[in-house]
Amino acid sequence: MQQLSFIMLNKNGSSGELRDALAGSGRVHLLSDCDNLEQMLADVTRLRPSAAVITVAPENSEKEFALIKQLAGSCPETAIITAARDASPALILGSMRSGAREFLQLPIIADEFRTVIDRIEEFSASIENSSKKGRVIAVFSGKGGTGVSFFGTNLAAAMGVPTLLIDLNLQTGDAASFLGLDTKYSLADFVHNRTRLDDSLITSLVTPHSANLAVLAAPLEAHEAEDIKPQDVSELLHLLGRRYECIVLDLPHTFDPVTVAALDLADDILLVLTLDIPGIRATKRALRVFDRLDYPRRKVHVVVNRWSKNIDVQLQKVEAHLDEQLIGFVPNDYRKAMDSINLGQPLVQTDPASKIAVEIKRIASLVEKDNNPASQQPRKRSLGAIFGRQDRTTGLELSTVPDTA
């Protein structure tokens, strides 16, 4: 189940309490925190969140009930929750008659709050069954230089469904050039125009690459990165998930607020690893950060990039050290990879029979199936047996890799 998306109206002084309760639930991300009725109407209509929370007060109830009626009529897929300190029967009944699904007493009672979130989750699940949202796949590495952009662009090109590649390397992103594209618009243009985004504007701001692939480039100027906030990323992924069956995120190797916002909303994180001490150490550190962020391990899948049989390391020891199964091994072929990058042509399209392309397409098919990719990996044979390296002595001693994050 994906996190629930909420929009909140806080004109009656309950902002901090509600925000803290939603954040503390672990099941909700806040798309927007509105100051007035007009902004609430505009944001809910545009973003279509899982739920809208409206605080009501007796002195303003007529205007707030009118807003609830309007939202219930125009956005039936959004559950409306009203909250109030004065939980009089008239206020509760008026809320429900206007179209609210749930009522929250303030100050918040923990058991009641959990029950409301459970009911919204059930309602949202029923809506999702009839209107499936796009799958978000984040490609990330704990260190630079591991080939994340090459892997991410080829992964996006390998997907067999309408896919959007978003470059979130805000200051140095170059994913569009990996696809041979000269982009006119970028993520910054999306953010600057986010209050009026519709299908027509979205079509004009993304750059098509092929029938099934389009790109949303990183800002064209480095200073524009400062305009992009974590909430903008949450909003855009929420909107674009209705338009594309798959969204691939090319992420930087830092845990900055924008990157964490993107990782929070990803259905799958492909964690790219190179088999050297810095690469293994960075991967271990990233997995520990994911644990602190409460990401379920089924969401994280470790992929080895630049794999070679000449690397003196036992893969079983790497798995044991990371406490994570390796689901893919993208072969090392420097010449092919550099030719692909320099020509701006994804290898999965120009040389689909190459070993690199075959493995990336296999990984794409695992993720695309909406299953746990790790469960697809055969376990009856050891990794050493699969690669013909059962008994070789290791040259890389994992005991030298620090366990501290």
Image (tube, rainbow, N blue to C red):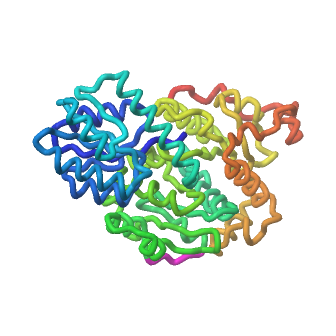
Q: Answer above or below: position of 373 versus 332.
A: above
- Judged by its main secondary structure, the magenta piece is loop
Magenta stretch, residue numbers: 180-184
Residue 384: % across, % down: 84, 35
User: Going 24% across and 32% down the picture, which residue do you hit?
Assistant: 17
Q: Is residue 223 visible?
A: no
Residue 96: % across, % down: 31, 40
Q: Is residue 159 visible?
A: yes
**Residue 278 occupies quadrant:** top right
User: Going 26% across and 28% down the picture, which residue do you hit?
Assistant: 105
Task: Please state, as top left, top right, bottom left or bottom right, where the N terminus lies in the image.
Answer: top right
User: Going 23% across and 40% down the picture, which residue do you hit?
Assistant: 55
On screen, residue 20 versus residue 323, left or right, reads left
Membership of 257 in magenta stretch: no
Q: Answer above or below: position of 199 versus 29.
A: below
Q: How many marks?
A: 0
